[in-house]
Image (spheres, grey):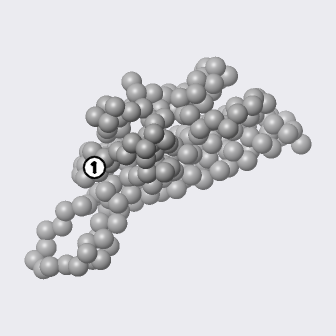
Amino acid sequence: MNIDYLKALGFWTVGIQYLHLVQAVSSEICQQGNVHVLILDETISSEQYDEKTKWSDHALILPLLFNFYHGLEVLMKGFLSARGLSLKNSHKLSDLLKNFKNEYPTSNLVPFFEKYIEQAHLPSILSDFCKSSNITIDDYYQALKYGEETSGKQYQHYPLKYKDEKGVSFFSDLRNDIELIRKESVSFGRQMFPDIY
């Protein structure tokens, strides 16, 4: 079997699984309404509050963003390795996107990758956060792995949280975009290796 295909398939499988997780959790956040404020006639414990708000951006946005960006990284690496390109252990999303666009300029995946990686295309929640923190998605993705940037700078994540309906809208778009990314990735991968499918 084709070595490039096997390597690409390994990346694609992992990337799709990370994206599936983010899609499923985003769906649940939307369904539950991204609740973080409770108005009740009784006092509740912190454990009860955590249970009632477990499907909200304030509890989930950071791990979701990490898993989402890791899924995009691995997915792009799959497409690049399918062409036999050396990946040089790069984790910089903008570099991977640049290489992806060079190899596949007409791919239907390009607009989705641009939307979540390039500053000019970011959804407003991410764009506003990056602008106020004076960072790029590359910097933030690195910080999500370790809690701080490689220079030691820590970020205030508060602007990404407690977004109520705006958060529901963001997660709804994210869920829908992931659905399309997943479908397009499978279709595109099959087109690249028609002899295998």
Residue at 19 percent across and 78 percent down: it is 44
Residue 87 appears at what percent x and percent y? 70, 33
Lateral position of residue 163 relative to residue 59, left or right:
left
Residue 178 appears at what percent x and percent y? 50, 44
| Mark 1 element type | helix
Residue 194 appears at what percent x and percent y? 80, 34
Q: Quadrant of the C terminus?
A: top right
Where residue 25 sits, quadrant-wise, is: bottom left
Lateral position of residue 48 relative to residue 103, left or right:
left
Lateral position of residue 173 relative to residue 108, left or right:
left
Q: Residue furthest right?
A: 1
Q: Amino acid at mark 1?
A: Tyr
Q: Which residue is mark 1?
A: 158
Say which of 15 and 153 sits in front: 153
Say which of 127 and 155 sits in front: 155
Residue 98 appears at what percent x and percent y? 58, 23
Residue at 38 percent across and 33 percent down: it is 135
From where the camera sits, is residue 145 visible? yes
- Numbered disc total: 1
Q: Quadrant of the N terminus?
A: top right
